Amino acid sequence: MIPIVAMDELFFELMQVATGKLDCLSRGPEPEEWQQLYELSKQQQVAGLCYQGVERLFEFGLRAPQDVSIDWMADAEEEGAYGEGQRGRMRIQDVYRLYLQRRLNMRVLVDYADTLRRNNGKNETLKGGGPMSLIGQRRFGRGVMWMLQHTLLLESEHMPFTPLESEGRFLLSDVMQKASRWQRLRHVLLTYPLGIADLRA
């Protein structure tokens, strides 16, 4: 199993601060770590959201270096004010398709978590592709629930599927670009063998 590194965990905490789920980080980042957090926020397309977390940390005396903060603020402004559910109504099939297309990132997961919170996890059903495809989608859905629980502290009452840690850990390592191309390909072929058919559905 691919481990989730400490810097990623700090990044998840920053998103939790930004969304009001956490008051402060578990520790103050070193100057070079602020730069890494900033780079991660850009990579995952959540610079605007994470900068809200940076601003909230000011009151705890945690401040990013000035040069990092200025660049971060500029990217946040360029990204636009971050609002809930900017992608509109999202379903697990959309998240699944984006994963197969290698387009799944934290921005998508944040928007999907917002959708689940607004709907209390209702109206989520799996469809298409036959029984084997549904098995893969259900495992994927359970993995996504674990990811949302671990990274964004999504409450269990908003989850349409029971979290599955083993699947979620791999998916998260892939989203955070820690899994190799071979590890990803092997996982997709073994876990979602009918993924190509799902892309056509």
Image (spheres, rainbow, N blue to C red):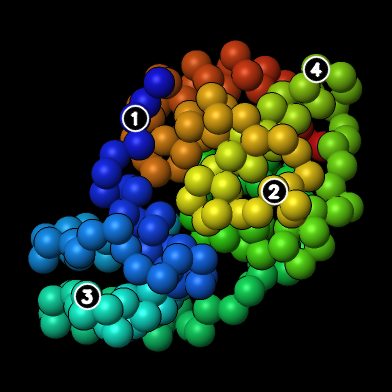
Of marks 4 and 3, which one's residue comes earlier in the chain? Answer: 3
Quadrant of the rendering where the C terminus is positioned: top right
**Left or right: 34, with 120 as reference point:** left
Within 10 Å of the Cα at label 1, are there few (<14), some (14-19), or many (20+) other Cα atoms?
A: few
Circle 3/circle 2 CB separation < 8 Å? no
In the rendered image, is residue 51 in sight? Answer: no
Say which residue appears at 59% left-offset and 17% top-offset.
189
State whether residue 137 is above or below residue 191.
below
Judging depth in this view, the residue of 51 and 149 nearest the camera is: 149
- For residue 60, the mark is none
* Label 1: which secondary element: loop
Give the residue at mark 3: 62
Of marks 1 and 3, which one's residue comes earlier in the chain? Answer: 1
**Left or right: 158, with 155 as reference point:** right
In the image, which is nearer the foreground, mark 2 or mark 1? 2
Of marks 2 and 4, which one's residue comes earlier in the chain? Answer: 4
Say which residue appears at 75% left-offset and 38% top-offset.
161
Residue 33 location, quadrant = bottom left
In the image, which is nearer the foreground, mark 2 or mark 4? 2
Give the residue at mark 1: 3
Compute the Cα span from label 4 to label 3.
49 Å
